[in-house]
Amino acid sequence: ALRLRGIGDVHWIDAAQRGDVAALMARCAELARVPVAGVLNLPAPRAPPIADQGGVDAWRRALWLGEQCFFVALHELSAALLDGAHVLAATDLGGLYGRDGTAVGGALRLVGGSVGALKSLAEERPSLRIKAVDLDPARSAADQAADLLAELELEGGRQEVGYPAGRRTIFVS
């Protein structure tokens, strides 16, 4: 979808690279050799919640994949980010970030910490275009992609946005 809109080169950090610290660091070093116009952190489609009896290793893995690998990637790519670069982190908690008990499935998922990290980054790097977007996983992938592209194209606006049932919702926090 980004290429169809005339966006230049799009590079991925694939699931295997996200799952391994050394591979993630190596991929970020490779990407940071040239100026970076954006970093998007997208949720894994229908990522399962943490099992009640998953144990410490399951929690650590979920925390790494849901939060920490994005923070590490941002840190490693920070110096290469151009002024005006986009930094967007999406979650799939239903569009309201789980407010009022609306998180899809109601189970524990470690995916919401990016909002605070992005707010801190906005203070540190005000020239970046930063968004945290919560999507409704009940909507189609095409509709969710359209929501994300709309946020990327929007100049200014709130940093924390949700799309419950496809309705753009802003949060005062």
Image (tube, rainbow, N blue to C red):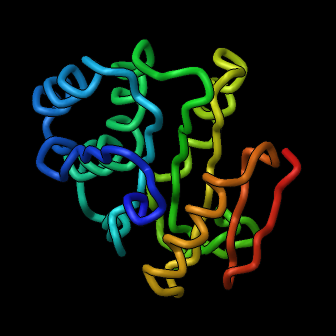
Q: Position of residue 70 (x, y in %)?
A: 39, 37
**Image: 64 above or below 151:** above
Which residue: 46% across, 81% down?
142
Q: Position of residue 27 (x, y in %)?
A: 17, 30
**Image: 140 above or below 21:** below
Tell which of 40 and 21 is nearer to you.
40
Quadrant of the snapshot with the N terminus: bottom left
Total numbered badges shown on the rendered structure: 0
Tell which of 59 and 157 is nearer to you.
157
Which residue: 54% across, 45% down?
88
- The quarter of the displayed image where residue 75 is located: top left
Which residue: 48% across, 71% down?
107
Which residue: 62% across, 57% down?
133
The outermost residue toward the front is: 6
**Image: 68 above or below 138:** above
Quadrant of the snapshot with the C terminus: top right
Left or right of 86 on screen, residue 28: left
